[in-house]
Amino acid sequence: MITIETLVVTISGLDRAEVEHWIAQDWVRPTGSAGAWLFRDIDVARLRLIRELRYELQLQEDALPVVLGLLDQLYDARRRLRRLRNAVNRNAPPEIREAVLQALTAEE
Amino acid sequence: MAGDPYKTLGVPRDATDKQIRAAYLKLAKTSHPDLHPGDATAEERFKAVSAANDLLGDPERRARFDRGEIDADGHERPPPGPPPGQRYYRDHAEGPGGAQYSAGFGTDADDLGDILSGLFGARGRAGMRREGEDRRHALAVPFLDAVRGATQRLVLPEGGSLDVHIPPGLESGQVLRLRGKGGPGDPPGDALIEVEVAPHPLFRRDGRDIHLDLPISLAEAVLGGRVTVPTVSGPVTMTVPAGSDSGARLRLRGKGVPASGNQPAGDAYATLRVVLGPADAGLATFLRDRTDAPVWDPRAGLGDSV
């Protein structure tokens, strides 16, 4: 985990006040508390993503919560699917796995 | 070597800067790896598009490329995305730690959601494991217990009680999770305890620092002296410098919220408040009769800002 001081030198073009604003908006959730934030790897990667969305892809600030909200739901769904896949792979007999595969590849 | 940047962006060789910018933005949005986690080719496409834009988006570099002075790989800027050795957001978000940014539907961050939760419920297969549900509770914590840490007993509405271990430095609104202390099941659910820290008549908290008002006598303010100050970790002795005014703030290093985990201890701040105390005839006589008092106006300048 790294402090906000280390963070702003690690990711070029990141502004400390802006990071604090993003935290206040609940778009990034580091551990610790105001004045002593600690950023995990996932927080750093998410900050890099937000910066790219905002400045490389030029999303307006008010579009960010919409995009992040949809992304969070997408990753929730993908984590669930992954767990489902693992559970099916581990526990389901071959004919069930085959039936699931058929159902997923067939047209609705 | 990278391909023709004009082809990568899908623009003609005489495209305007604006056309190049628009083409780049459109392609970047449809190829950013974190926006397309299921697309294995997204990262490669995003890098190619970014590299092409680095070259063509800068008129000077574009001119050099058109003259053949640099090739399509000749970018000086670092490539987009995380530096070598670090991963994209999508690689974190799909791992076990990703739940911290869950959109948060349902009671548990990683529950099944509305579709999958219907998967086995309808069949009610015998011997099927049923997880216990999480239960939420509210707990009022006295100020000093929240600062110093304590164990508090929570009486449950359905009977029984829980011993809640309060870590030092707890703040209002924090939620403590007691694993396995929620609804019965296999595995049992968790108890989620939202704490509300009560205010204290003397101490106020600001992050890990503790503030208090400290009354001192006129004599202590003028002449200075040693005074006893209450702190969250017991009374300490502090020296008030001679000539200390009301409102002066003295710091007691390390006497705030005690250190815990990787958080250092906070400080205590005593704000002095001069108190006259009972009527003092001798002092009144002295003030009335003295002839060498310095002339000054404590309200000088007040009218300027009205």
Image (spheres, coloured by chain):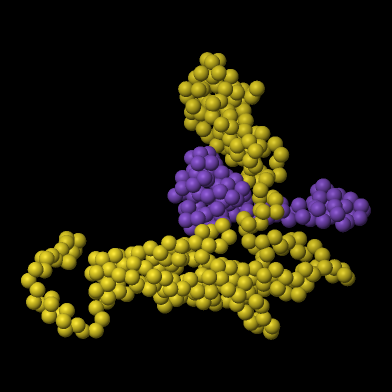
Chain colours: A purple, B yellow
Give the percent coordinates (x, y) of residue B75: 56, 25
Q: Quadrant of residue B237?
A: bottom left
Q: Is residue B90 visible?
A: yes
In the image, taking residue B146 as reference, residue B276 lies left or right, namely left
Q: Residue at x 21, y 84 (%)?
A: B279
Give the percent coordinates (x, y) of residue B200: 44, 76
Give the percent coordinates (x, y) of residue B198: 49, 76
Counting every numbered tag in the picture gives 0
In the image, taking residue B196 as reference, residue B294 lies left or right, namely left
Q: Nearer the viewer, residue B229 or A106?
A: B229
Q: Nearer the viewer, residue A87 or B238?
A: B238
Q: Quadrant of residue B27?
A: top right
Tell me: residue B305, above or below residue A67: below
Q: Is residue A54 visible?
A: no
Give the percent coordinates (x, y) of residue A53: 55, 44
In the image, taking residue B201 as reference, residue B172 lies left or right, namely right
Q: Residue at x 46, y 75 (%)?
A: B199
Q: Nearer the viewer, residue B174 or B69?
A: B174
Q: Quadrant of the N terminus of chain B?
A: top right
Q: Residue at x 70, y 36 (%)?
A: B41
Tell me: residue B144, above or below residue B21: below
Q: Quadrant of the C terminus of chain B?
A: bottom left
Q: Residue at x 52, y 54 (%)?
A: A37
